[in-house]
Image (cartoon, rainbow, N blue to C red):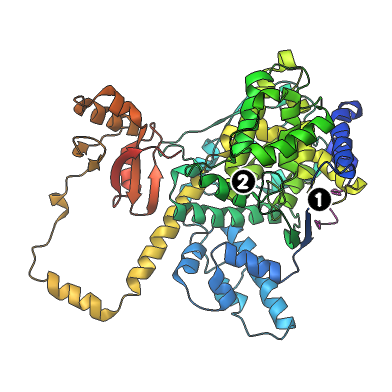
């Protein structure tokens, strides 16, 4: 499933995945694995067939180039979007793209296929001092680059030591997202990563408490962006993930589904996207399967304080009967939830997750999650990779994972009564998330999955970080949009340009003085007063503008104002759309996106 540099620690070893805990503490994990095996052998679970294999060289690279928005490199044509992406990459990101393009080009050459552009035509000729000439070092602000004064004064030069200096106790550390993670992988960090013998921390209490550094541009969540900008984020995430793994000399391959036979109706064993389509016919706004939500709420109502919840199984025969009744009666509303004991609900919940025909982490990215557990040893670096991988997931998978992690955090919060620590919960949940349906559970795979318990622990503890977008990715999206806009403008015919020049010749020229500096007009179609000109200063926040509109619209009833939670949106210019954090300083956003419009409307959920 994965191939790896022979100089790196082996992936498929139990010692690599279990150095974080004493062998006796893995008992819950192996008991859960055995329970899953017995459930499959006894026929309690539907045995749909889903098989995976790694994609072949050349094909993998071609698919990757297309996914990251560089399809023009595959087709050999010129394309504005591809050129825009290339011009925004950092040196390390560009190296990752060049590596895959070179493999793709060489594969086609060996197969005597059509000619492709020479790698030097795309990236320029190497020299000894710079990896690339034509691809810029970065279109980000130069102060963000590694080694710059800002980089040093921000404390990032010594960030490689922060994960190991507080081993015996929890510490508070600030995460900064203004520099690409791959650019932080200095020679010092790579050497420390190779020498690291402490794979995972032994105790939950030793995990540091991370906080996100909030810069003046505010924190952005994935749902705050327009669909097109989210697509750009995914492209850049894929490139950044590749750059990180390449820098660490970890060779990875994504899986490909080759044979699928799945259910098309019902609740269990149905593809997540299809199940959501069925649910949305009943509730158009639903983003997480209804039966999944109901199982979670059932446990939350009565089982969060139950000792051994999730670990202590319900009756296997009763769970099987309940499942059959759910399949028959859930949608018509006749299923009797009062008969469901909390341990049975927990069993149904785990069965739902592991019976997904495609893993919740997706077949494509599941190997990368495992690699993060088995081949990366520094906790902060693991978290950074996990952060990127979560952003790569399709919306239904990420939304479903989000509600699951929120539920698991509630279980851990009741540890004093239910005796389920963070590590206990992670050990129980990991096999259900990482053991793919339809595959035999062999010893090799179980050893890999044991390391996944640590990954699940990180996902639960640091989940609030995972739904945010690193600011360096937002900066790159702005650059992609700006470059694409300029390219489209330059592609217009000279005739149209001349026509416009002729039409504008008789009009008075508009000077900068006609537009007051630092003044924005904010539109609020939901309010009685639909627009307002606001003079910005260095202290003006998005929350201040919202409060001012509420004050100006006091004649509206309190019920009307509370009906929807409103937010200020940045729309257009070098961004598609972005819902602004209330603590965002608007003058700073205005200065980097002066062409934006400002709109108050209901907050994205």
Q: Secondary structure at mark 2?
A: helix
Residue 45 in percent (x, y) is at: 80, 43
Look at mark 2 in the image and give the residue it sits on: 397
The secondary structure type at the circle numbered 1 is loop
Are the residues flagged by discs 1 and 2 in contact, CB closer than 8 Å? Answer: no
* Magenta-span inclusion, residue 186: no
**Can residue 563 be seen by looking at this rendering?**
yes
Report, in whole angstroms, how far the alpha carbon at label 1 lies from the one at label 2.
22 Å
Q: Main secondary structure of the magenta part?
A: loop
* Badge 1 or badge 2: first in the primary sequence: 1
At which x and y percent is residue 459? Answer: 67, 35
Query: Residue 339 at x, y = what percent?
Result: 70, 24
| Residue range of the region highlighted in magenta in the rendering | 1-12
Q: Which quadrant holds residue 217?
A: top left
Taking 330 as reference, is 83 above or below it?
below
The image position of residue 133, as x and y in percent, is 54, 68
Q: Nearer the viewer, mark 1 or mark 2?
A: 1
Q: Can I make out residue 462 in this image?
A: no
- Left/right of residue 166 with respect to residue 3 in the rendered view: left
Frontmost residue, 492 versus 424:
424
Query: Which image quarter: residue 405?
Result: top right
**Residue annotated with mark 1:** 47
């Amino acid at each position: 499933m994965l191939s790896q540099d022979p100089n790196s620690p082996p992936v498929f070893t139990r010692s690599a995945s279990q150095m974080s805990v004493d062998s006796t503490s893995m008992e819950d994990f192996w008991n859960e694995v055995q329970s899953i095996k017995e459930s499959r052998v006894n026929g309690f679970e539907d045995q749909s067939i889903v098989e995976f294999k790694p994609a072949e060289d050349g094909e993998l690279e071609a698919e990757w180039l297309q996914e990251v928005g560089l399809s023009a490199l595959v087709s050999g044509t010129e394309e504005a979007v591809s050129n825009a992406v290339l011009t925004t990459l950092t040196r390390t990101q560009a190296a990752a793209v060049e590596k895959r393009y070179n493999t793709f080009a060489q594969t086609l050459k060996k197969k005597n296929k059509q000619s492709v552009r020479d790698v030097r035509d795309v990236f320029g000729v190497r020299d000894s001092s710079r990896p690339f000439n034509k691809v810029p070092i970065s279109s980000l602000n130069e102060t963000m680059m590694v080694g710059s004064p800002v980089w040093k004064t921000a404390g990032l030069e010594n960030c490689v030591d922060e994960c190991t200096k507080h081993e015996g106790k929890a510490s508070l550390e600030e995460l900064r997202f203004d520099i690409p993670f791959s650019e932080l992988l200095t020679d010092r960090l790579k050497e420390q990563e190779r020498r690291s013998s402490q794979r995972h921390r032994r105790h939950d209490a030793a995990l540091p408490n991370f906080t996100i550094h909030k810069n003046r541009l505010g924190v952005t969540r994935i749902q705050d962006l327009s669909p097109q900008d989210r697509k750009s984020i995914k492209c850049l995430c894929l490139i950044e993930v590749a750059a990180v793994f390449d820098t660490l000399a970890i060779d990875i391959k994504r899986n490909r589904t080759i044979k699928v036979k799945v259910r098309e109706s019902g609740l269990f064993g149905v593809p997540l996207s299809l199940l959501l389509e069925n649910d949305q016919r009943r509730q158009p706004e639903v983003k997480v399967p209804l039966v999944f939500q109901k199982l979670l709420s059932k446990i939350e109502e009565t089982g969060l304080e139950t000792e051994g919840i999730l670990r202590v199984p319900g009756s296997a025969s009763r769970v099987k009967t309940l499942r059959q009744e759910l399949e028959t009666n859930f949608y018509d509303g006749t299923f009797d939830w009062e008969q469901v004991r909390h341990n049975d609900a927990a069993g149904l919940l785990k069965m739902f997750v592991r019976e997904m025909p495609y893993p919740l982490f997706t077949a494509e990215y599941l190997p990368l999650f495992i690699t993060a557990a088995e081949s990366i040893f520094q906790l902060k670096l693991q978290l950074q990779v996990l952060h990127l991988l979560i952003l790569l997931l399709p919306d239904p998978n990420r939304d479903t994972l989000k509600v699951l992690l929120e539920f698991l955090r509630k279980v851990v919060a009741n540890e004093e009564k239910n005796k389920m620590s963070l590590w206990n919960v992670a050990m129980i949940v990991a096999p259900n998330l990482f053991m793919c349906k339809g595959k035999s559970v062999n010893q090799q795979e179980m050893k890999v999955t044991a390391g996944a318990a640590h990954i699940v622990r990180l996902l639960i503890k640091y989940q609030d970080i995972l739904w945010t977008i690193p600011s360096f990715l937002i900066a790159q999206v702005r650059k992609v949009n700006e470059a694409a806009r300029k390219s489209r403008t330059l592609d217009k015919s000279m005739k149209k340009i001349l026509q416009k020049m002729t039409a504008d010749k008789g009009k008075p020229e508009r000077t900068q003085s006609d537009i007051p500096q630092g003044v924005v007009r904010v539109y609020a179609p939901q309010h009685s007063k639909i627009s307002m000109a606001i003079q910005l200063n260095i202290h003006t926040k998005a929350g201040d503008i919202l409060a001012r509109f509420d004050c100006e619209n006091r004649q509206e009833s309190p019920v009307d104002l509370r009906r929807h939670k409103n937010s200020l949106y940045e729309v257009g210019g070098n961004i598609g759309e972005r819902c602004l954090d209330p603590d965002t300083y608007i003058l700073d956003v205005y200065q980097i996106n002066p062409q934006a419009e400002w709109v108050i409307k209901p907050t994205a959920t």
